[in-house]
Amino acid sequence: MTRIKIAHLYPKLLNIYGDGGNILALKKRCEWRGIEVELDEINIGDKIKEHDIYFIGGGQDLQQIEVSKELQKHKDFLTQERDRMAVFLGICGGYQLMGHYYQPHNGEKLLGISLLDAYTVAGDNRFIGNVTIKTDLIENGTLVGFENHSGLTYLEGETEPIGTVLIGNGNNGGDKLEGARFKNVFGTYLHGSFLPKNPQFADYLLELALGFKPEPLDDKIENLAHNALRGKKY
Ligand code: GLN
């Protein structure tokens, strides 16, 4: 039987706007196909062993301080995991910490783990609202979600965006880019939950992790959720 190992990093600290739903979506989409799932919650102080998929959600600046410190202990290991093409998904606050750093309005710069060549600085506005982006990574071509951040993220080097913004602000509200990808590491500002509303992207991540295309599922309900948000600001 095929088996997949998923790590949920720091769910007690970084987990807002339904981020935990991403884990549920990955787990159920595997189980519906008879793929066995080992799910490990990694909390402060825990060791991290090899997994196929790593997920980290969003949160407030306060929780990011603690996670930023803890992640430094695992930076070398997680970099090795990235380089052997393990899959990572980071949402909002978690995305910011997968880059080089997040500079909040007040206080010290929070170091990230540089899995992505990206950095984030707090801006003067808070971007709140629904987002639709256009992406070439999946066949249906759009991703939807909900953003709530003041951090402005900028990509450098070989780190590519996931897509371009059609509705909403995305990485920084200026360059029309949303999300980031380097190797199999993905970051995005899309909460709400992201993967349940974007089933093709969930399967894209599973395909990268499994090394084969998982069989199609009946995504009628998931697609209704996707289509209800697509192209809508309110
Ligand atoms: N502190 C970050 C910001 O506002 C992250 C917010 C979040 O994860 N929703 O930019």
Image (cartoon, rainbow, N blue to C red):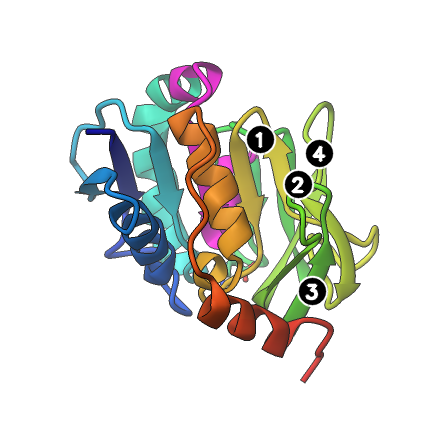
Residue at 32 percent across and 25 percent down: it is 74
Disc 4 from disc 1: Cα separation? 9 Å
Residue at 60 percent across and 78 percent down: it is 228
What amino acid is found at the position of numbered circle 3 in the picture? Thr
Say which element carries label 3.
strand
Mark 3 and ligand 1: say if the CB distance to the nearest ligand atom is below 8 Å: no
* 155, 228: nearer the viewer: 228
Q: Is residue 92 visible?
A: no
Horizontal side, residue 104 vs residue 75: left or right: right
What amino acid is found at the position of numbered circle 2 in the picture? Leu
Against 152, residue 228 (above or below) is: below
Q: Earlier in the sequence, mark 4 or mark 1?
A: 1
Disc 2 from disc 1: Cα separation? 18 Å
- Where are the magenta residues, as a range? 80-100
Cβ–Cβ below 8 Å for labels 3 and 2? no
Disc 4 from disc 3: Cα separation? 18 Å
Q: Which residue is mark 4?
A: 160
Q: Earlier in the sequence, mark 4 or mark 3?
A: 3
Q: Which residue is mark 2?
A: 137
Q: Earlier in the sequence, mark 2 or mark 4?
A: 2
Crowding around mark 4 (Cα neighbors within 10 Å: few <14, some 14 to 19, many 20+) is some
Disc 3 from disc 2: Cα separation? 14 Å
Cβ–Cβ below 8 Å for labels 2 and 4? no
Horizontal side, residue 30 vs residue 109: left or right: left
Say which element carries label 1.
loop
Against 196, residue 200 (above or below) is: above
Against 189, residue 84 (above or below) is: above
Query: Does residue 84 belong to the magenta stretch?
Result: yes
Residue at 28 percent across and 28 percent down: it is 51
